[in-house]
Image (cartoon, rainbow, N blue to C red):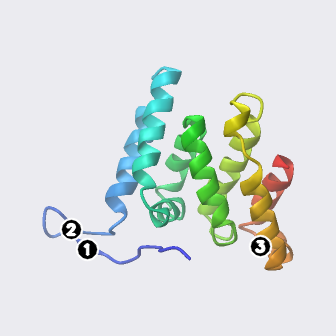
Amino acid sequence: MFCHCNVFVQGAFGGEKRRPIADLVDYVRSCSKALDGLSKTEENLLSSRALEEATAAPDRLFSIASDQRGSKPLEKLIKKATPEVFSLIFKMLLEAFGDLATNQYASHVLETALRSWADRLGNDKPSLHHCQPLVTACSRLNDEALWPSLAINPCSAHVLRALLMAL
């Protein structure tokens, strides 16, 4: 399971109360906005560095993916990440597939990651493109009998469609 981080803490400048994940979401958002106008190499580097920071622990990634303000910028960073960082993020997201697919924001992050994985098939080094995380995710969905419930859930149906298209 992952943390939704709905606990509020005292802000750095007093008075204002912010969620603990708010500063990290702000960082991801600013990095996402900074991608515009950069070269492809600079985009890859900034995206990868931001994702490495955001994913120092899996629960941080899941919290950003589940956040209304963090999910869209996270999707943009995932699309632009280097193959090595993308592979790490992809594996982390698929390990929590059942939990993330039913979240209204994280489901879109999963869909973007699945589409990006499929787009990268012909572009990346074959050694960086592992199918095992997909196979493991599908096996886990089968073992836990989650396929039917995910197929009828309004948040996860589009993620299953993206998963099937990626296969």
The first of marks 1 and 3 along the sequence is 1
Q: Is residue 10 visible?
A: yes
Q: Is residue 83 left or right of residue 138?
A: left
Q: To which residue does mark 2 refer? A: 16
Q: Amino acid at mark 2?
A: Glu
Disc 1 packing (10 Å; few <14; some 14–19; many ≥20): few
Asked which secondary structure carries label 1, the reply is strand
Residue where numbered disc 1 is placed: 9
User: Is 55 on the left-hand or right-hand side of 96?
Assistant: left
Q: Nearer the viewer, mark 1 or mark 2?
A: 1
Quarter of the image for the N terminus: give it. bottom right
Residue placed farthest to the top in the image?
A: 39
> Between marks 2 and 3, how big is the CA–CA gap?
37 Å
**Amino acid type of disc 1?**
Val
Q: Amino acid at mark 3?
A: Asn
Res. 157 image quadrant: bottom right
Q: Tell me if I can see residue 76 in this picture.
A: no
